[in-house]
Amino acid sequence: MHSSDIEPGLVVILYPGLAGPLRRKIRDRLESYGGEVTAVEGTGRFYLEVRGEVAAIRSLVVESWSGVEKVISLGGEFLHTAADPDRGPEGVEVASVRLGAGSFSIIAGPCAVEDEQRALRIASSVAAAGADLFRGGAYKPRTSPYAFQGLGDAALEILQRVREETGLGIVTEILDPRDVDKIAEVADMLQVGSRNMHNYSLLKELGQTSIPILLKRGFASTIDEFLMAAEYILSGGNSSVILCERGVRCATATDEVVLDLGSIPELKKRTHLPVLVDPSHGSGASYKVPALARAAATVGADGILVEVHDQPEEALSDGAQALTLDQFEELVPQVHEIRAMFEGHISGVSDDLVSTPGGEDR
Ligand code: PEP
Ligand code: MN
């Protein structure tokens, strides 16, 4: 699609059962700022589609108007990521697990695949504890060229064994666009790491495939940049993208990274894509991981990506942030319980907006 095809707009979602005169008042106010407003009747509520001169309206805090529940931005350049008010979240299917369609999913495993026995031990343990998918890096993007770079091709063979033995779907990182076919033979989802979120040739290449992509937020990236990176993949034709918040660079007294949990409701408001949280890279310290994983469940994430190791003190990478097998087992029921408690308060596109256009509101 060319930029000339882009028709920006807004959808103003009204509270269920809002009385006619109040609906009309909101509509008149939007029109007074130059908007062309169409009222659409959903199940038990109306929403107002606003086209035309929306720039002035965007700068108002319409969300704070009485009777308005939420405002969704349409068009602009966020053509494929923008939340669709006509549809509830469909989610993305990865190895027969549907992420982002209402349930809380857990991807767990070591930072890197280190050896076959260890990978199998961790995988069978996290599977028994309730993990939905297994993660493990074969090609590692390390800060130092002298640090462990991952086992490479040998790790892919191990991941294949893990999949066969445990039945868990596999998530592993891709660094080089030339490796797509090779990795896709064993992986059910390819991870684009934080350092590669701005690697546009890699994103374009992945857009040409139909493999699910786990796109991690660049640690110095804004939400707009994050969504635009997803646009690179989606606009190429690959609709299976899952976002992952993994913390941003910010030096505090003790840390180099701060997990931006506020990005979750922001992303859930702006996009239909599933959103995960990585409390491991988002903290760098295992003692913080359970608390941040529980927080992820309260702010509306669709799941977590968490590093687990049978002997964190021996891990070849990221041992300091890895949960032990026991710690992981303890965490799983907690996040599900929290998620169940907050069900119904999770922001995102409401299911009850499924409707056919029509129902003019005046
Ligand atoms: C990882 O998941 O192992 C990883 C390297 O994460 P990030 O790209 O978020 O640093
Ligand atoms: Mn790691």
Image (cartoon, rainbow, N blue to C red):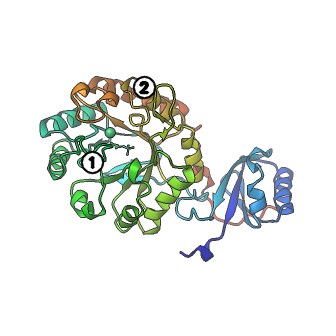
* Quarter occupied by residue 31: bottom right
Give amino acid for label 1.
Answer: Gly
Q: Is residue 190 above or below residue 181?
A: above
Q: Is residue 163 above or below residue 228?
A: above
Is residue 185 or residue 229 the one in the foreground?
Answer: 229
Q: Residue at x 81, y 49 (%)?
A: 19
Crowd around label 2: few <14 · some 14–19 · many ≥20 (10 Å): some
Mark found first going from the N terminus, 1 or 2 = 1
Is residue 316 or residue 209 the one in the foreground?
Answer: 316
> Disc 1 on helix, strand or loop?
strand
On-image quarter of the C terminus: bottom right
Instruction: State the image coordinates of residue 1 (x, y, percent, origin top left).
Output: 53, 75
Q: Is 362 displayed left or right of 332 in the figure?
A: right
Q: Looking at the image, in which quadrant does ligand 2 appear?
A: top left
> Disc 2 on helix, strand or loop?
helix
Tell me, yes or no, if residue 272 can be seen here.
no
Which mark identifies residue 288? Answer: 2
Instruction: State the image coordinates of residue 12 (x, y, percent, origin top left).
Output: 71, 55
Q: Is 82 displayed left or right of 54 in the figure?
A: left
Q: How many marks?
A: 2
Q: Residue at x 36, y 66 (%)?
A: 205
Which mark identifies residue 251? Answer: none
Instruction: State the image coordinates of residue 180 (x, y, percent, origin top left).
Output: 27, 62
Is residue 110 or residue 186 the one in the foreground?
Answer: 110
Tell me, yes or no, if residue 70 can be seen here.
yes
Q: Is residue 113 above or below residue 33?
A: above
- In the picture of the structure, the residue carrying the numbered disc 1 is 169
Give amino acid for label 2.
Answer: Lys
